[in-house]
Amino acid sequence: MSGFAGFALRRAAGAVLTLLALSVIIYVVFYATPGNVAQITCGPRCSPEQVHQVAQQLKLDDPLYLRYWHFLEGIVAGQDYSTGTSVEHCSAPCLGLSYQSDQQVMRIILTKLPVSLSLVVGAMVLWLLLGVGTGVLSAWRRGRFTERALTGVTLAGIATPVFVIGLVLMIVICGQLELLPFPEYVSLSDDPEQWAWGLLLPWFTLALGEAAYFARLTRASMLETLAEDHIRTFRAYGVSERSIVGRHALRGALAPIIALNANDFGSAVGGAVLVESLFGLPGIGQELVHAVNVVDLPVVVGMVLVIGFFVVVANAVADVLYAVADRRVVLT
Amino acid sequence: MSLVQVSDLTVDFGDLRAVDGLSLRLEQGAALALVGESGSGKSTVASALLGLHRGTGARVSGSVEVAGTDVARAPEDALRRLRGGKAAMVFQDPLSSLDPYYAIGDQIAEVYRVHTRASRRAARARAVDVLDRVGIADARRRSRSRPHEFSGGMRQRALIAMALACEPELLIADEPTTALDVTVQAQILDLLHTLREETGMGLLLVTHDVGVAAESVDDVLVMRHGRVVEHGSVGAVLGAPSEAYTRELLGAVPRVDAPRALPEASQEAVLESAVVEEGVVEGHVVEEAVVEGVVHGEAVVEGVVHEEAVVEGVVHEEAIEEGVVLEAVGLRREFGRGKRAFAAVDGVSLTIRRGETLGVVGESGSGKTTLGRMLVGLLEPTAGEVRDIGHARVGVNPAVQMVFQDPVSSLNPRRSVGESIADPLRARGERDEGRIRGRVRALLERVGLEAAHYDRYPHEFSGGQRQRVGIARALAADPHVIVCDEPVSALDVTTQAQVVALLGELQRELGLALVFVAHDLAVVRQVSDRVAVMRRGRLVESGPADEVYGNPQDPYTQQLLAAVPALDPEIAARRRAARRRAAAQESARHESARRDADLRDADRRESAVT
């Protein structure tokens, strides 16, 4: 287990460095962005004095490195903010206050994250089931009609934009057939059943396009495995095609599936904004787009760090799964 | 009823006729070898016996009957009962022929359960049984290992165990020892022999190696272009072949027990050089002793130990007198770091003289390739140095070139062969396109290809031709030493003989020194003036080829030579008996030691994966 502990430690250190680098990049990018942040934050009707006051309050006139230093300090030690009338304490790890609403960024994230995770985790289960299942079926029925039909369907799935899938699903299922009410987000802790019903369409919307990629990848890497010598061994020993495809070929095809899934899961946490807006889900993606529009630096940094965190963690988990799936892989 | 009855078998892959009207018969318990060069159709026949061409697009005609099953007409489930149940196949490459993701015991158990109604537990127990039977020590524990944790020989044993699981009547072995070292090959062939004696199963052995066939079977069938050339008992076919092709094939097989057959011209040259060398240094292995930048060489002059100190950077005068063109002193190369570090080459010193061939033999993992790469400068030694006529060398030296093992992967498939051969010229700074083209054309012709081949691509050439391209590329830089790393091990025997002859010609013509690195003891004997035997990174023995082969001093060299398959079946049988006696004594003494060594090997491989 010492090997694993070492691996975890090295990975954690790597993750911290990655996230630090991310935050620096975002600070620099926003610093270089044209436009008066104080003016935007204050609103169009603010007088120059008011704008000046806002700038002071938000410490916008401080040099960049000082602002970044305060930000790091907040994460480690927490921070006190004056919001004009009162002083608010933001305990560590503090990602600062939103320029717009004076809310703590950490709290904003904590309200948005469950929505995004509900969406992405559910969709991931679906895209894995659908995608890998379709891929296995294609590989098993290779060269036959089933495979050609499935290949066509998956190509269509990749080519169709996610909002088209979402709109069609919503119009047909909720509008025409009235099988489901129009989806509405209910939190899992409030009512698990309503939560699941409400997310059913978003899950499918996000998963269908994604599943097409997984189907193609699974099919391709299974066909590759099926051409390998050890498959020939089991054929020559009378092992049935079903067990050759389902047991030996699938196992050999797992590695690229694990890798793709790690990437897609990580990026979907912050990148499912289309699905979120389509179904009115108050998730990370929507909030991020809004924050970028109003140059709400603390919120953007916080969100990006959370997304980065998920990408890094998902990849570390993928590496562990690699090693479990293939004993030749040694974690270092 | 015969165990195998094939009549008028024809197999076509598209336009290619791989097997052309072949008939053969194998009785219960008999052993037959299909011998032929690559492309002769021998493996295609083996696959046809199990109906493995079904669904691959190959057209099969004629009738094939194996253990009472009509392979051509049997329904799918009858065919599956035959495969592994009545006739089991052992494949060539034991690494790629096992599923890397599952434990070896589980894979054998899976096959067993296909053919019996055994429970999981019983099947697992059966797997341990057969693994034990094929000589896997501590079979219960090792059955939980995955293929990468086994050595090559153990994997081949595991595949044989899988074949034995259902007690088949027929064992089809397709090149079962081709990927193995010679000592391991001998063990596997002995194992097959013993199993056949014990179980009475029939054996169909597919091999390109006539020696392997002589060791293992009663009858031989020589194949060429999908047809039978000659068929008869081993003694008759190999002892007194009646067909010209068989004679040609046997003639091309390098003999480990025959002295080097030199072409007349070179014999004179050797006589001359022998006169020059008389009274000088013999057995040029210089013992290592590196002391703070000062290199002491210890040379044995006709039995008298004579010490000479050579200070770095100073030209070794004596070396020039002896015609030494390349000298390696105390070479050591480690791979890995910390606890995982191991020395692939560990203190090797040697000299190479103008116009001579130094053979370096050793089994896989002995460090011979690492040594070759250090001589060329492709690898930096961890300690010691390579001196090119006395000068310490840094980086790649154009005067020392390399010919690589695999002529397929050592040529860039996307560039014409002419471009590949021109690389060393361009690397040397030649910019005149006309001169480059002219030189490359001349080189192509020199190695027996046509000047017009300049614009062709590697896939348009056969293996032997590709190796000629590799040789032309090595010649391009006007080297005085060429290191050949297994230059012929991927080639058929007749092609092998041609390439070896070409190297010899070039050597005489250009006064090249050759370092011939190979695992094949017979080939090395046929090409080398002097031979160095490597084991675990060290030189265990070296000297003139005839001395090393005729009167090997080191036990390891003796063991290697005893393991080489003999072409004469009688000698083969005697050697086998001797090996068995030795093995019985050995196993009694070293049972536990070997187990440790296997484990260490497995550990090493594991760390190599990282």
Image (cartoon, coloured by chain):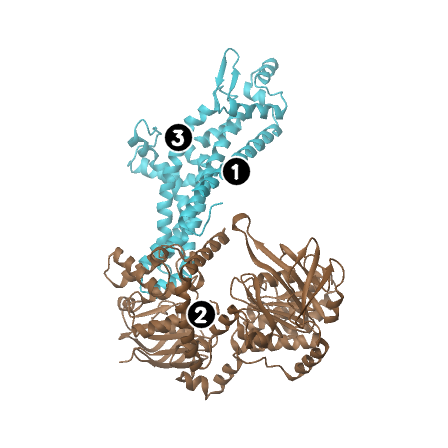
Q: CA distance from mark 3 to mark 1?
A: 26 Å
- Quarter of the image where the N terminus of chain B is located: bottom left
Q: Is residue B448 visible?
A: no
- Tag 2, which chain? B
Q: Position of residue A54 (x, y in %)?
A: 57, 16
- Tag 3, which chain? A
Q: Residues within 10 Å of mark 1 (few under 14, many from 20)?
A: few
Q: Colour of chain B?
A: brown
Say which residue label 3 marks: A114
Q: Amino acid at mark 3?
A: Pro
Q: Confirm whether circles 3 and 1 share one chain.
A: yes
- Tag 1, which chain? A
Q: Amino acid at mark 1?
A: Gly
Q: Is residue B8 left or right of residue B608?
A: left
Q: Position of residue B133 (x, y in %)?
A: 33, 65
Q: Compared with residue B285, is residue A82 higher up or lower down, i.e. above or below?
A: above
Letter of the chain shown cyan in the rendering: A
Q: Is residue B126 left or right of residue B483?
A: left
Q: Amino acid at mark 2?
A: Gln
Q: CA distance from mark 1 to mark 2?
A: 48 Å
